[in-house]
C-alpha cells in the first residue's frame, strides 16, 4: 500500500504548493485553454459539471451554485503546466482493479512488489477516451485498454463510459427523497462497462478484474465520511491501511462509521461486502455540504483489497475504499490536500466477449442544516448533530 500512497502524496505535494482552485469558472476557463471541455447543466444552469474526454473521460468538477459557484472537486492546477500529464484529480475517474495483490495492474511485472515499481498504466492515466455520443444530459465515451497484471497476464478490454447529469426527478427516483425548494444540489452518474475482447477467458488463477470508480475532493478539518453499516459491526470489521487511526479519526457511532477526511493524514479504510451499504456520504459543516454516494451493489463476494503484497486470499477485499491524503512520513501538516470517495464492482470470471458493469453516483446538497439533516437521517441513519469525532 505504501507505493499507492506515495503516488497520491506526490500529487498532493504539487497541489499543496499552490492555491486551491475553488471556483468552478476558474477551473473551467483554465481547462479550456488546454483541452476540449464538455459542460452539462440542469436546474436552470445552477447545477453544472465539467467532463474531459481527453483527460481519461473524467468528471473534473461540479457546482450547485452556477458558473460563479464553488467547485466541489479537487483539481490539481499544476498538472496544466505539466501538459495535463498525471495527477490531474477530478470528481470521478475510472481505473481498473485490482489495486493490491499479485494480480494488480499498478506494480509492473518486476518482482517483488515494491514502492519503486509503482506505476499507473498509461492507458488509465494519460490516454484519451473517444466521444461517441453527446446530448444535453449525457456524454458517452469509449476506449480500448490493453493491460498486463503483475504476474504477466494480458488483458484486452473494450471500455464504455456514460456520464449523466441528474435532475431533481432523477434524484427523487434514485434516493426516494424530496429536495426542499431552497436546497442547492448537483448530481451525476458515471455508468461503466468493460468487455473482455481478448482471446482467452479471464480466470481466478490468472487474475480477475473490476471497475473502480474514485472521486477526489478538497480536504477540510470538519469533513467526515459517513458509512452506515448494514449489520452490527465494529472497527475490526473494517480494513485499515497506512497510518494508525485513533478515535480522533475513526469511530463507529450508532453503527455508523465516521472517518475524518481532512486531507492532512495519510490513511485509508476499506468496507468489506458483509457490512457495506449501497449508499454512504460525507458532511462538511463549514461548506454546508452533504455529499451522498450511491453505487451498484450486488450480492457477489469477490473484491480486491489494497494490500501491496502477494496474497493468499487476493479476492477478500473491500466494496468501499476511502482514502485520506497526507505526508509520506505522517509528519504534521496544516495544509490540506484531498480525500477520495470510491466504490468498486465485484470481480468474476469473464468468458470471451463477456461484460462487467458498474455505476457510481454522486449527489451534492448544500443549504440549511436542518434540511440536510432530514436527508442524512433518511439515507445514512444518523443525525448531523452526531457526525463528529469528539471523544472522552
Image (tube, rainbow, N blue to C red):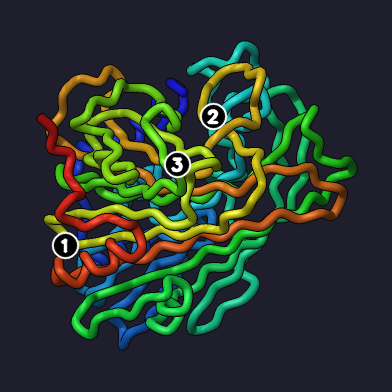
Determine which residue is flagged by label 1.
288
Circle 2 residues within 10 Å: few <14, some 14–19, many ≥20: some
Cα distance between the residues tagged 1 and 2:
37 Å
Compare marks 3 and 1 and give the one earlier in the sequence.
Answer: 3
Residue 274 vs residue 19, the one in the foreground: 274
Which residue does the image show at 79% across and 29% down from the upper left?
206
Q: Position of residue 204 (x, y in %)?
A: 77, 32
**Quadrant where the C terminus lies?**
top left
**What residue is shown with label 2?**
119
Mark 1 burial class by Cα count in 10 Å: few <14, some 14-19, many 20+: few
What label does residue 86 carry, if any?
3
Q: Is residue 81 above or below residue 287?
A: above
**Residue 109 in view in this figure:** yes
Question: Nearer the viewer's eye, disc 1 or disc 2?
Answer: 1
Separation of residues labelled 3 and 1 (CA atoms)? 31 Å
Residue 360: give x, y in percent of width and height.
Answer: 50, 59
Q: Is residue 201 above or below residue 4?
A: below
Amino acid at each position: 500500500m505504501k507505493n499507492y500512497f506515495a503516488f497520491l502524496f506526490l500529487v498532493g505535494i504539487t497541489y499543496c504548493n499552490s492555491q486551491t482552485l475553488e471556483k468552478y469558472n476558474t477551473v473551467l476557463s483554465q481547462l479550456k485553454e488546454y483541452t476540449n471541455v464538455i459542460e452539462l447543466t440542469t436546474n436552470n444552469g445552477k447545477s453544472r459539471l465539467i467532463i474531459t474526454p481527453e483527460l481519461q473521460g473524467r468528471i473534473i468538477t461540479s457546482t450547485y451554485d452556477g458558473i460563479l459557484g464553488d467547485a466541489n472537486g479537487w483539481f490539481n492546477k499544476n498538472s496544466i503546466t505539466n501538459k495535463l500529464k498525471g495527477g490531474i484529480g477530478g470528481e470521478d475517474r475510472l481505473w481498473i482493479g485490482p489495486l493490491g495483490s499479485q494480480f494488480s495492474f499498478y506494480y509492473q511485472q518486476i518482482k517483488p512488489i515494491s514502492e519503486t515499481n509503482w506505476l499507473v498504466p498509461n492507458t488509465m492515466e494519460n490516454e484519451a477516451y473517444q466521444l461517441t455520443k453527446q446530448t444535453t444530459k449525457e456524454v458517452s465515451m469509449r476506449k480500448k485498454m490493453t493491460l498486463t497484471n503483475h504476474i504477466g497476464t494480458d488483458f484486452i478490454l473494450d471500455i464504455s463510459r456514460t456520464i449523466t447529469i441528474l435532475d431533481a426527478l432523477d434524484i427523487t427516483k434514485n434516493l426516494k427523497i424530496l429536495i426542499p425548494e431552497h436546497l442547492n444540489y448537483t448530481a451525476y452518474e458515471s455508468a461503466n462497462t468493460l468487455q473482455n475482447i481478448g482471446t482467452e477467458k479471464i480466470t481466478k488463477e490468472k487474475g480477475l478484474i473490476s471497475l473502480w470508480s474514485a472521486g477526489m475532493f478538497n480536504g477540510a478539518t470538519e469533513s467526515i465520511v459517513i458509512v452506515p453499516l448494514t449489520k452490527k459491526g465494529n472497527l475490526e470489521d473494517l480494513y485499515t491501511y497506512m497510518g494508525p487511526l485513533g478515535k480522533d479519526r475513526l469511530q463507529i457511532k450508532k453503527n455508523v462509521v465516521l472517518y475524518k477526511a481532512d486531507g492532512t493524514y495519510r490513511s485509508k479504510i476499506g468496507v468489506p461486502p458483509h457490512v457495506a451499504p449501497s449508499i454512504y456520504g460525507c458532511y462538511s459543516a463549514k461548506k454546508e455540504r452533504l455529499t451522498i454516494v450511491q453505487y451498484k451493489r450486488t450480492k457477489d463476494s469477490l473484491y480486491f483489497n489494497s494490500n501491496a503484497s502477494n496474497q493468499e486470499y487476493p479476492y477478500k477485499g473491500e466494496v468501499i475504499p476511502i482514502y485520506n491524503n497526507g505526508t509520506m512520513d505522517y509528519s504534521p501538516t496544516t495544509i490540506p490536500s484531498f480525500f477520495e470517495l470510491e466504490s468498486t464492482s465485484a470481480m468474476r470470471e469473464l468468458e470471451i466477449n463477456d461484460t462487467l458493469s458498474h455505476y457510481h453516483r454522486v449527489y451534492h446538497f448544500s443549504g440549511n442544516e436542518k434540511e440536510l439533516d432530514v436527508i442524512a437521517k433518511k439515507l445514512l441513519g444518523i443525525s448531523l448533530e452526531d457526525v463528529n469525532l469528539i471523544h472522552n
